[in-house]
């Protein structure tokens, strides 16, 4: 079926992205894997291509295109090539809306041009050791100084994507204690400068997958954050998180779909070239049936994510909608990728093959951004259950 929500401009962008990935990422991706991180300078190249600036308003150096479709295309093209851009997966997809919707004009002038160019890389720090998906249970505190000029930030965060390369981090912290009837009250967002005293990057976590993504532990010890770097209004941070989590979950669903589509392509190409018992593996009925089943699931995921992207662009994607996209796509993708790895036989378990990396990379999709169990709870609540 022809995809109806992508036009000639989108397809031209797809060609540009594919050529960039083939020239700038594929030849060095093994080096990135060995290092466990993307070189910081690479993000300036991404900025020069204009990829970071598509949704950023023109007055701040971007293209001013209010659509998520270009981010979706980038995700598809990275998966198609069996690569990623590492920790920058949060820079625009997750962090940008917090700045465009809640920053003051002065803050936008300070941060958005650098976001577009790749000079200022953003990450967001929500999760804390021991609290997991319970964001309201966070213990990181930000106490206003006696003279009202700055906050004193203390606490720790973990599983922070892009945490090593980040220049600015949106940190969720308690500026007030929770209310008896509202645990979510009292959380604020601070955009911290990673060069400030008291900020520290701990371990770069050694993960099963997403090996080039710099996932880190962060700590804040009596760190002074100017009040000018408060994002939005004090104590309203949880409402901002709730508003923007659907976009994060959409991005995870899109990524899962893209991985499944890529896995199916890899398996089709591998089985066509692999000879067993004097015949190509793709000539066996089991192979045909397995690939057909994978293709059917990928088609279903494509329809789901395309409809969701349209809803996002129309500002009608609800929290339950996004949860449904994430739940369906991440679980369906894991099934597809597992089947495709099986079709590779023993070589599917060798990390030099992209299917092995996809297998490891995709598993976290059902955990971060809210676990599958949390997604089911959101959907059930929306159903009135």
Image: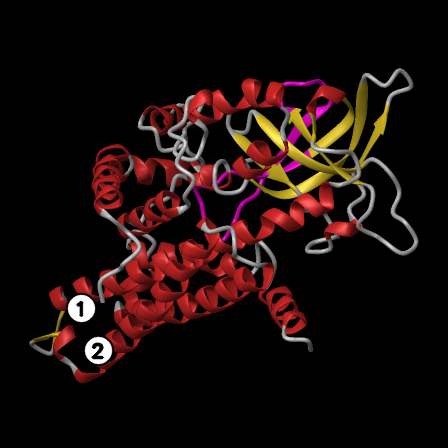
Q: Nearer the viewer, residue 1 or 213?
A: 1
At 74% from the left and 52% from the top, the residue drawn is 131
Kind of element beneath mark 1 = helix
| Alpha carbon separation for disc pair 2 and 1 | 8 Å
| The image quarter in which residue 17 lies | top left
Residue 207: within the magenta?
yes
Q: Is residue 170 magenta?
A: no
- Binning the other alpha carbons within 10 Å of mark 1 as few (below 14), some (14 to 19) or many (20 upward) gives many
Of residues 333 and 239, the one nearer the viewer is 239
In the image: residue 268, left or right of residue 99:
left
- 350 lies above or below 221: below
User: Which mark is on residue 271?
Assistant: 1
* Label 2: how many Cα within 10 Å (few below 14, some 14–19, many 20+): many
Circles 2 and 1, Cβ within 8 Å, touching? The answer is: yes
Tell which residue pokes out farthest to the left in this image: 278
Q: Which quarter of the rendering shows the C terminus?
A: bottom right
Name the spot of residue 199 as percent of width and height, x first.
69, 25
Whether residue 179 can be seen here: yes
**From the image, which quarter does the N terminus lie in?**
bottom left
Q: Position of residue 336 (x, y in %)?
A: 36, 70
Q: Residue furthest bottom?
A: 285
Which residue does the image show at 89% across and 56% down from the upper left? 181
Residue under the image location 57 percent in, 43 percent down: 205
- Give the secondary structure at mark 2: helix
User: What residue sits right under mark 2 in the picture?
Assistant: 287
Q: In x, y percent, where is residue 30?
A: 32, 40
Which residues are drawn in magenta?
193-218
Asked if 212 appears above or below 201 in the picture, the reply is below
């Amino acid at each position: 079926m022809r995809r109806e929500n992508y036009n000639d401009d989108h397809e031209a962008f797809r060609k540009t992205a594919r050529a960039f990935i083939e020239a700038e990422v594929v030849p060095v991706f093994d080096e990135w894997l060995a290092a466990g991180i993307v070189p910081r300078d690479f993000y300036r190249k991404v900025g020069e291509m204009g990829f970071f600036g598509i949704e950023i308003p023109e007055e701040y150096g971007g293209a001013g295109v209010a659509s998520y479709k270009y981010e979706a295309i980038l995700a598809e093209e990275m998966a198609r090539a069996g690569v990623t851009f590492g920790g920058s997966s949060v820079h625009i997809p997750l962090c940008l809306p917090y700045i465009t919707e809640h920053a003051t004009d002065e803050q936008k002038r300070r941060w958005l041009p650098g976001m577009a160019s790749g000079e200022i890389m953003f990450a967001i720090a929500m999760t804390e050791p021991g609290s997991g998906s319970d964001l309201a249970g966070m213990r990181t505190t930000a106490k206003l100084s006696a003279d009202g000029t700055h906050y004193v930030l203390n606490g720790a965060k973990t599983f922070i994507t892009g945490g090593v390369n980040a220049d600015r981090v949106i940190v969720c912290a308690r500026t007030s204690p929770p209310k008896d009837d509202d645990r979510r009250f009292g959380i604020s967002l601070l955009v911290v400068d990673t060069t400030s005293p008291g900020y520290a990057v701990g371990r770069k976590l050694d993960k099963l997958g997403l090996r080039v993504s710099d996932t880190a532990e962060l700590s804040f010890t009596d760190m002074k954050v100017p009040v000018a770097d408060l994002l939005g209004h004090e104590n309203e941070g949880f409402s901002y998180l709730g508003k923007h989590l659907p976009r994060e979950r959409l991005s995870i669903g899109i990524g899962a779909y893209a991985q499944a589509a890529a896995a199916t392509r890899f398996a089709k190409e591998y089985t066509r070239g692999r000879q067993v018992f004097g015949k190509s593996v793709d000539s066996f009925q089991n192979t045909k049936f397995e690939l057909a089943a994978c293709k059917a699931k990928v088609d279903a995921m494509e329809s789901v994510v395309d409809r969701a992207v349209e809803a996002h662009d129309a500002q009608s994607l609800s929290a339950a909608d996004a949860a449904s996209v994430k739940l369906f796509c991440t679980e369906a993708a894991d099934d597809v990728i597992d089947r495709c790895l099986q079709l590779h036989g023993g070589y599917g378990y060798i990390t030099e093959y992209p299917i092995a990396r996809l297998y490891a990379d995709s598993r976290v999709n059902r955990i971060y951004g809210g676990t599958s169990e949390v997604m089911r709870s959101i959907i059930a609540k929306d159903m009135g259950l």
